[in-house]
């Protein structure tokens, strides 16, 4: 049983498969003490190192792919460690012995809502990559009404400091007084993109909630700071959206609780507590909203 080296490294969550090919070609990867080559295959008992640091891995046939939905509250940062000792989203997740959680996208410290985590780094990279155009949907509260002309400008494209950006859709969903709520969709994960687009037309965002990532909707009844594991059918839906291959998975004891398009999930798979702190997990890279 063996697997291509760059595929293993991508799934661990160290970068995309193409980037890992560059790392291997640069001579930074070794297998059993010798410099590895692009396209080389690795076996379960091999010792794998990058820049001299040992990397734990599993061959794909040995892995049960897992995906969590987490309801991020305000005040948590999307980072594994924080020099200011602020709470992080990873502290709330269940432990995953011999593996690690990889974060799909980010939310800034003041934003709330849906975050996806998986133990499959390659799936995470595909879900975040702009070429796959995975939709991210948000509910945003701003001060003042956004005029039809401003809506038109933002759906056609506005220029930000890192290039042009646009909303795929923009609709009003309510509000009272000077506070108005809107529902917006983007297909990128650029840093604070939603906030910056609205600020560019003179409307500051006072609240931002991610309510959907691709086909996955923030489940109704899931409390802030709690997580829920997706069932196999929902994981397959995510994989189909990015044309990811499905491994032959070994039998495992689990109670999958799917999340459907309406946001309902199996309550048995929902963690109503704050999760286990201090887990050895890692995060992916993408922009925060």
Image (cartoon, helix red, strand yellow):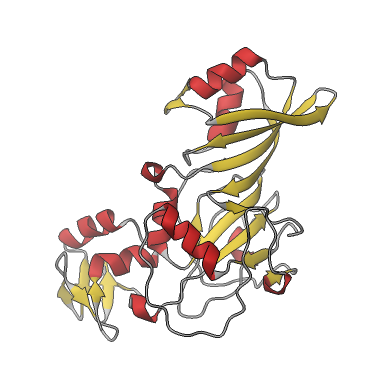
Expressed as whole percent of the image width and height from the top left, the position of residue 114 reads: 62, 52
Expressed as whole percent of the image width and height from the top left, the position of residue 64 reads: 46, 76
Residue furthest out toward the right: 177
At 50% across and 58% down in the image, what residue appears? 103
Out of 265 and 166, give the one closest to the viewer.
265
Query: Up-down: is 260 above or below 248?
Result: above
Answer with left or right where residue 153 lies relative to residue 177. left
At 56% across and 26% down in the image, what residue appears? 197
Expressed as whole percent of the image width and height from the top left, the position of residue 270 reads: 70, 69
Expressed as whole percent of the image width and height from the top left, the position of residue 130 reads: 40, 42
Query: Up-down: is 196 above or below 78?
Result: above
Answer with left or right where residue 93 lies relative to residue 21. right
Quarter assignment of residue 116: bottom right
At 28% across and 66% down in the image, what residue appears? 7
Any part of residue 198 in sight: yes
Query: Up-down: is 34 above or below 191?
Result: below
Any part of residue 87 in sight: no
């Amino acid at each position: 049983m063996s697997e291509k080296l760059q595929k293993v490294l991508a799934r661990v969550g160290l970068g995309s498969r193409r980037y890992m090919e560059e790392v291997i070609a640069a001579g930074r990867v070794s297998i059993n003490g010798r410099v590895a080559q692009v396209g080389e295959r690795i076996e379960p008992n091999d010792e794998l190192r990058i820049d001299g640091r040992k990397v734990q891995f599993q061959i794909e046939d040995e892995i049960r792919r897992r995906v969590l939905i987490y309801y991020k509250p305000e005040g948590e940062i999307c980072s594994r460690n924080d020099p200011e000792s602020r709470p992080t989203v990873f502290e709330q997740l269940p432990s995953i012995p011999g593996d690690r959680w990889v974060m799909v996208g980010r939310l800034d410290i003041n934003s709330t809502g849906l975050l996806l985590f998986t133990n499959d780094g390659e799936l995470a990279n595909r879900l975040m990559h702009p070429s796959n155009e995975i939709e991210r949907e948000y509910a945003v509260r701003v001060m003042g009404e956004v005029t039809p002309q401003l809506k038109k400008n933002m759906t056609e494209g506005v220029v930000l400091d890192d290039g042009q950006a646009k909303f795929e859709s923009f609709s009003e969903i309510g509000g009272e007084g000077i506070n108005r709520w809107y529902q917006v969709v983007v297909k990128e994960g650029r840093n604070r993109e939603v906030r910056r687009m609205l600020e560019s037309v003179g409307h500051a965002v006072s609240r931002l909630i991610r309510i959907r990532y691709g086909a996955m909707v923030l489940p109704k009844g899931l409390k802030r700071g709690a997580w829920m594991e997706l069932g196999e059918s929902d994981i397959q839906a995510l994989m189909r959206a990015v044309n990811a291959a499905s491994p032959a998975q070994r039998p495992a004891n689990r109670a999958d609780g799917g999340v459907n398009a309406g946001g309902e999930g199996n309550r048995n798979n929902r963690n109503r507590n704050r999760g286990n702190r201090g887990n050895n997990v890692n995060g992916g890279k993408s922009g925060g909203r």
